[in-house]
Image (cartoon, rainbow, N blue to C red):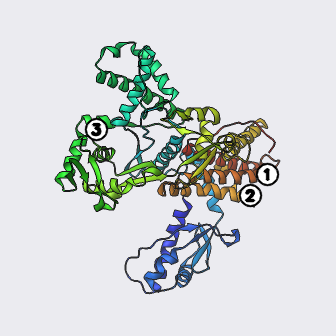
Amino acid sequence: MDVEAEVARTLVPAVQAAARDLGWQGDLDYWQEFSRPPQKEMGDLATNVAFGLASRLGRTPREVASAIVSKLTPTTLVESAEVAGPGFINLHLRREWLYDVLREVAARGPEYGRAAPHGKRVQVEFVSANPTGPLTLGHARNAAIGDVLARLLEFAGWSVEREYYFNDAGGQMDRFGASVEARYLQLMGLEAVVPEDGYHGDYVAALARDLVSEMGDEPLALPPRQRLERIRDAATRHVLDWIARSLERFGVRFDVYISERDLKERGEIDQAVQRLLRSGHAYVQDGAVWFRSTEFGDDKDRVLVRSNGAHTYFGADCAYLIDKFRRGFDHLIYVWGADHHGDVARLRGAAQALGFDPAGVEMLIYQWVSFLRNGSPVPMGKRSGNFVGLDELIDEVGADATRFTLLLRSSDSTLEFDIDVVKQETMENPVYYVQYGHARIASILRHAAERGVVLRPIEDVDLSVLSTEAELDLLRAIGEMPGLVLEAAELRGPHRLTHCAQELAARFHRFYTDCRVVTENEPLTQARLWLCTAAKQVIANVLALLGVSAPESMERFDA
């Protein structure tokens, strides 16, 4: 049950009746948000609905709130209400809805909290690292945010397609190819030097060795330009395989891979540029083609095609926009690093210039992660070869801890990731704290089974015996999960899931401390076992959205 949605529906008659009493006629549109009162005795939920109506009704929020409360009759969900502060309405809910939550979890299991499909399609494009080397620590946050956002949107009813876009054309790829070629030629006993602005890492030499094993001296028979292209393309395929394997280890999958080179070879980039020229949104100056991005809020116009005839990344992005919308998506989401902040206006402007609704183009910008080891910065430069790869991080820390830690803070906040701190298996480690909660519940259920306790169908269990503060707090956390997940999807806030998981675990750990589960009181034992079962399921559901495992057992430790 999405309790906030249910309460909102319950309030509608009271709001409409109050508005009529205050002189409003006709239809009434208003907004409201729910929050938790600062103290438990003040209620279960607070709503600001009166603030959303006050200006329209020509009254103060407190007057509106008082009128709503006077019209609100108790229901099976809402027991009572009272006006608080400048116009908030504090709502006290009946305990029975919490027991209904347990029954819903028992009925829906892994689907608890999932919204019904609404038929809209969204594409989430993320990672999209250039195929010039292995994925580094710098790509990890993008991968975690994009993957969990896609999971969230699916849970919220969207049809989601995950896409990886390879910038595999242009000067950067040529420099990468020249770097691998130089190492290849050296291995073949020929003199060659890696370009100064090329790629100098050990992985380049490893690529060259793989190519020698794969192709032998075959490329040596080709003219220089063809040899470079042959080596570059073969090296690119190897790197793409590396990237795919790393992402699989990180729990990330993609539905579609798109290549910039394919867009170019199909003529789609040229077609996009011509479309902008015909519409008057692009012009030729000094031999180059420019997009009038200043007309769409950018600080200057942007080059689509350079004077030498080579397209820019932005030129390819315009063709890619057309390609995306042609495939019938209702909404597009790009997950970009902070260095792309300046690209937002020009890309939305390009969408509008090409005839698409710019509101359907969304950029989620995330801030950088500072990776540390015992407080000291970890190197990040791929081109110099001085970097730590994503695979190395997974080997040392594990995918679970890496993903959870990268999602602890909002994407618009910077994050410090100390490798040695994150891999510690203590209750101070958030992911360990949550996973241990799930494992502890599994242990309780195993203990009950070993004691011969058979869990009865929930319909035959008296749940009303769950009445202590710790039990009710855990029930509330379980009941709040669907609303929190849908809010995380709507606000594009994967970090909200880590907070939800930690709160669920904290409420369970407190319950475990205060309440013995398997007792001589058989009705109470049954009710508490169902509470444990539901808590375990909901923690597992949230961890699944985070792409983090929910272990059935973990080594005990001295907390």
**Disc 3 packing (10 Å; few <14; some 14–19; many ≥20):** some
Would you say residue 549 is visible in this rendering? Answer: no
Please name the amino acid that badge 3 sits on: Leu
Question: Do the residues under discs 2 and 1 have CB atoms within 8 angstroms?
Answer: yes
Q: Position of residue 110 (x, y in %)?
A: 56, 44
Q: Residue 428 carries which label?
A: none
Residue indicated by mark 3: 263
Secondary structure beneath dot 3 equals helix
Q: Quadrant of residue 432?
A: top right
| Number of residue marks | 3
Q: Quadrant of residue 401?
A: top right
Residue indicated by mark 2: 470
At 65% from the left and 70% from the top, the residue drawn is: 43
Residue indicated by mark 1: 513
* Between discs 2 and 1, the one toward the N terminus: 2
Compare residues 331 and 139 and report the one nearer the observer: 139
Q: In which quarter of the image is residue 419?
A: top right
**Disc 2 packing (10 Å; few <14; some 14–19; many ≥20):** some
